[in-house]
Image (tube, rainbow, N blue to C red):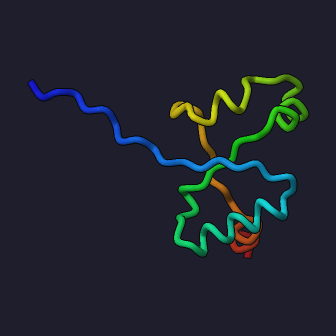
Amino acid sequence: MKPVQDPPPVREAVCVFEDTAALLDAIDELETSGFDREDLSLLAGKDTVEAKLGHVLERVEDLEDDPKTPRQAFISPESVGDAKG
């Protein structure tokens, strides 16, 4: 019987942005540096989740390293405009 191998570790960077412009600038820089758009995902902070849902699900700090945490691909405003065009 073959030994069960652990999955390879996931390399991940996490950052907090104070405004949308800084987030979009960072995403542009990452894409320019060779990152694929599907490799980027977003997590929301406590205040944002609370404002949208009316309650807090879990702390972001508990979720960011959990491989089972759902991720959402980033879709830039330019892509939405391209799709409409």
Q: Residue at x 52, y 71 (%)?
A: 34
Residue furthest to the left: 1
Judge by depth and name the residue closer to the eye, 71 or 22: 22
Q: Nearer the viewer, residue 47 or 53?
A: 47
Q: Quadrant of residue 80?
A: bottom right
In the image, residue 74 above or below residue 24: above
Residue at x 12% of width, y 28% of height = 2
Q: Where's the C terminus, which quadrant?
A: bottom right
Q: Is residue 20 left or right of residue 84?
A: right
User: Residue 25: x percent and y percent?
Assistant: 75, 68
Compared to residue 75, the image places residue 5 above or below, namely above
In the picture shown, does residue 14 fall above or below 76?
above
Q: Residue at x 56, y 73 (%)?
A: 33
Q: Position of residue 69 (x, y in %)?
A: 58, 33
User: Toward which corner of the image does residue 53 lie, by quadrant?
Assistant: top right
Q: Position of residue 37 (x, y in %)?
A: 58, 62
Residue at 73 percent of width and 26 percent of height: 59
Q: Position of residue 49 (x, y in %)?
A: 82, 33
Q: How many marks?
A: 0
Along the line of sight, the residue nearer the viewer: 84 or 67: 67
Image quadrant assignment for residue 28: bottom right
On-image quarter of the N terminus:
top left
